[in-house]
């Protein structure tokens, strides 16, 4: 990051493919938040809502949102926890611009700062010192595996193009204070990769919550909390089932949409 930039300076060069029609606007949480995101390309998913719900920072903590996208997780956390400060890093200029606009339009510039940067270069001094918590919903498709599609932004958000899992966890460990926590959402099928990389980064898994899309389906996501230099000991929490047979949200799942 730029050594001379003051904390809170989050100016962006407008990408050439951005104009007044580049973003759509969605009002969520009964209109409490407005969210602009690219009309085409990567758009936030249920994973972001899950991450924001289960992060649960303590009062006055300082958080870093790694791979912030349009800023949806930062926005929800800041609105839900009115005394925290959130920093966001997003490498894609178009998404970073959307996040920057969202912060301004939701009047949260005093508590959310967004930087268009590569997380691989992040260090504690960029955020005024080590942070208390990192939240991440990282790309999960291995680079070169499967169909990547033609949209570069969407591909980069879903596949390990700019950063692999190890890069994300190394960045988290680097900026976290000792005993600081990471909360991450990741595909259940890659849980073994996640656990291996967490231990390698000195982030000890503390609890894991399986997420089931429906009652009879296998888990497709996990939410996991890890602690920097934490002691061994992993608790498996009760699962969350998202959808009822009729397609509606289960009672517990509906709570993640409340502020």
Image (cartoon, rainbow, N blue to C red):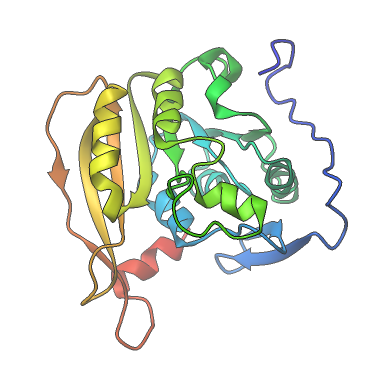
Q: Residue at x 38, y 70 (%)?
A: 254
Write down the quadrant of residue 216 in the picture: bottom left
Q: Residue at x 30, y 68 (%)?
A: 252
Nearest the viewer among 237 and 92 is 92
Q: How many marks?
A: 0
In the image, 147: left or right of 110?
left
Write down the quadrant of residue 165 in the picture: top left
Identify whether 211 is placed above or below 11. Answer: below
What percent of the width, then of the height, locates residue 40?
70, 63
What percent of the width, then of the height, locates residue 53?
40, 52
Nearest the viewer among 34 and 145 is 145
* Res. 54 in view: yes
* Res. 72 in view: no
Q: Residue at x 14, y 38 (%)?
A: 234
Identify whether 204 is placed above or below 225. Answer: above
Identify whether 207 is placed above or below 45. Answer: above
The N terminus sits in image quarter = top right
Identify whether 140 is placed above or below 179. Answer: below
What percent of the width, then of the height, locates residue 175?
46, 20
Q: Residue at x 45, y 46 (%)?
A: 137
In the image, 234: left or right of 258?
left
């Amino acid at each position: 990051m730029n050594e001379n930039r003051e904390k809170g300076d989050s100016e962006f060069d407008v990408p050439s493919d951005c104009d007044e029609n580049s973003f759509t606007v969605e009002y969520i949480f009964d209109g409490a938040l407005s969210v602009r995101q690219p009309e085409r390309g990567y758009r936030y998913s249920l994973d972001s809502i899950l991450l924001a719900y289960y992060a649960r920072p303590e009062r006055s903590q300082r958080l870093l949102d790694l791979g912030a996208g349009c800023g949806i997780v930062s926005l929800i956390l800041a609105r839900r926890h009115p005394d925290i400060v959130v920093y966001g890093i997003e490498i894609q200029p178009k998404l970073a611009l959307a996040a920057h606009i969202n912060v301004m339009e939701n009047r949260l510039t005093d508590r959310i700062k967004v930087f268009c940067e590569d997380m691989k270069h992040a260090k504690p001094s960029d955020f005024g010192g080590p942070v208390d918590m990192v939240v991440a919903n990282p790309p999960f498709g291995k680079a070169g595996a499967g169909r990547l599609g033609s949209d570069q932004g969407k591909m980069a958000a879903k596949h390990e193009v700019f950063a692999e899992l190890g890069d994300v966890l190394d960045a988290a460990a680097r900026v976290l204070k000792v005993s600081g926590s990471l909360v991450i959402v990741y595909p259940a099928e890659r849980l073994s990769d996640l656990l291996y990389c967490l231990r390698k980064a000195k982030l000890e898994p503390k609890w894991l919550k399986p997420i089931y899309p429906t009652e009879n389906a296998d888990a497709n996501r996990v939410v996991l909390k890890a602690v920097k230099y934490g002691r061994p000991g992993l608790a498996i929490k009760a699962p969350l089932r998202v959808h009822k047979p009729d397609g509606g949200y289960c009672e517990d799942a509906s709570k993640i949409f409340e502020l």
